[in-house]
Image (cartoon, helix red, strand yellow):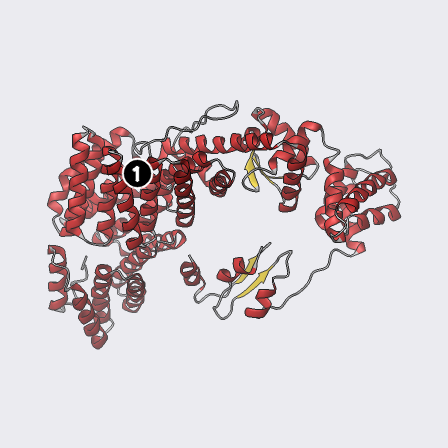
Amino acid sequence: MAAAFRSLLAGRRLLLVLDNAASASQVRPLLPATPGCLAIVTSRHRLPGLTIREGAARLTLDVLDQDGSVALLCGIISAYRDGDDPALVAELASLCARLPLALRIAAERAAGRPLMNLADLIGELRDESGRWEALTADDGDESEAVRSVFTWSYRALPSDAARLFRLLGLHPGPDFSDMAAAALADVDARTARRLLDVLAAAHMVEQTASDRFRLHDLLRAYAAGQARLEQTRQERDRALHRVLTWYLHNADAVQARVAPQEPRVALVPADGGLPEPRFADEAQAMRWYEAERDNLVAAVRAAASGGQDRLAWQLAVVLRSVYMTDHPLQEWLTTSRIGLEAARRDGDRAAEAELQESLGMAHVQAQSLETAVGHYESALALRRDLRDTFGEALTLNGLGLLELRRRNLARAQAAFESSRALFAALNDGFWELRTAVNLAQVELELGHPENALGPLYRGIEVFRAHGDRRAEGNALRLLATAELDSGAADAALAHAEQAVAIATGIRSTAAEAYWLLALGDAQRATGHPTRAQAAYRRAATLHGHLGDRARQAAAWDGLGQACLQLGQARKATDCHRRAVATYRDLQLTWETAQALAHLAVALDSAREPQEAAQARADALGLLVDFTDPRAVRLRERVVQRSPQDEDCQ
């Protein structure tokens, strides 16, 4: 992520605003090292490490001055109250320590009681200040003022709204939906919305969308404190359990739409009276997931830290199927690690196997291939020990995909064959065909597209019948590649376009980014290099956001070929050099050799024969260890030193 961020900043002049930082360590990875870039960091803490190590210039902001504080109060209350004594307004500002958040809450309270004398309102606030002085003698004036205003407003809430406010302090994240609030409070959706309206009117929550709200972090801490004071431990645990099971069941409903053929978990029963979640289609399911992404990670953490281990690992297992569609690597790794430890504490070895495999998948996407091997092997040992034949077949399929990434084609083929045999023994035709499609990919890598066409056509038909849009799109992408290799460029273009349309329809950024590479290849082959440039550029951008540097490099490599097709030799060499540098950094030998071969062709066109010769020599040195037919053909083309042989795929 840090490397992708540095790449994004390269050559640009940006002002970066890092708001509400908690610590110097949170800020450091985001500080730009590029000349012409600056960062502004805001925080309620002094962050001395930034001034000592990074040379930051500290500017301490004071609270609002008296005139500004009075202006803020008057701007809110003037439409609701007439004739307030300016001296009393100034006194109210002083009681709020001239802090904007406290001033806004106090102003809303005054505006909501237009017939009450301001002196009486100030008296109430002074009473709350006295209570806090007795309880928190060591705190500063600002902290005391904030708590006093919070308590003053909180005590004015109706009891049911005050209860919801307290429970919101237990919510795993600061942003939440009205349905999550309903789950927390164990009320129906209509009641939750009514109570949230009361809280929003009092500025105790902020409405951010028609059905979403957030708590300022100070208010959230205050609400959590009130929950500890006024709710029993059992009540707090039950509220947390209700909202966590609500997230679990909604995430499972997302999985039912986006990955219907993936194994399902026997869920912890939902706790509460809310209706069972359902999504009309995959797009609606992904919209819910996108809105709740941060909360889902926080929910896994909250379940684990709250002693609800079964909920923690079940959330992590369900989320794996969703993460497979969008590859949010840090979230995937974080939830799987927490879930794995929770499964071990819970003594559930089957769940442990699921999460070992999940970590293997995530590390494959992160290009940490050696680490991925260890997780897959652990999962396979657990599956076999548990005599889980279906799970063993799934893990072998995953191992095959891992070996494909490592270009160990014989091992990949063996793993897929073993997986297919187990699925056949289980009479699971769907998964047997999924594995056959993966075997078709091995045939493509070996340079045998004719062997791949049959399984791919069958796969597309079956996946379409089962409604598995992701599997259908992936098979269409592979079919386009097979057709390109067979010389059927027009058919390849049509199928690549269908694949990308599926990716956008199911709102899968990862699928769109990857399948755009096949579209760009087909557009080049059909004489549309300008369109291909657009496809590769979008693929590079999306892979950059996803943190998949290997596939981002593939997009740059394809872009270089499209540029060369348009006679833009200098641009082509720049693109290929970026691809080569990334592949080398990731230690991807095969991909580096391919990109070097493409670079050599571009350098020939740019009339740089010496550099072209060096690129060819480097490519040949890397190709020594590859003996498959496709590698042999690539080596032959490099040896021929023929500039017109542009397509070295």
Whole-percent x and y of residue 488? 15, 47
* Image: 294 above or below 262: below
Asked if one can make out residue 177 in the rendered structure from this viewpoint, the answer is yes
Residue hosting label 1: 470
Dot 1 amino acid type: Arg
Q: Is residue 416 left or right of residue 324?
A: left
Q: Is residue 227 left or right of residue 73?
A: left
Whole-percent x and y of residue 4? 40, 59
* Image: 194 above or below 412: above
Label 1 residue SS: helix
- Name the quadrant containing residue 268: top left
| Towards the viewer: 396 or 61 | 396
Whole-percent x and y of residue 53? 55, 69
| Towards the viewer: 189 or 248 | 248
Q: Residues within 10 Å of mark 1 (few under 14, many from 20)?
A: many
| Towards the viewer: 552 or 403 | 403
* Image: 253 above or below 38: above
In the picture, the quarter occupied by the C terminus is bottom left
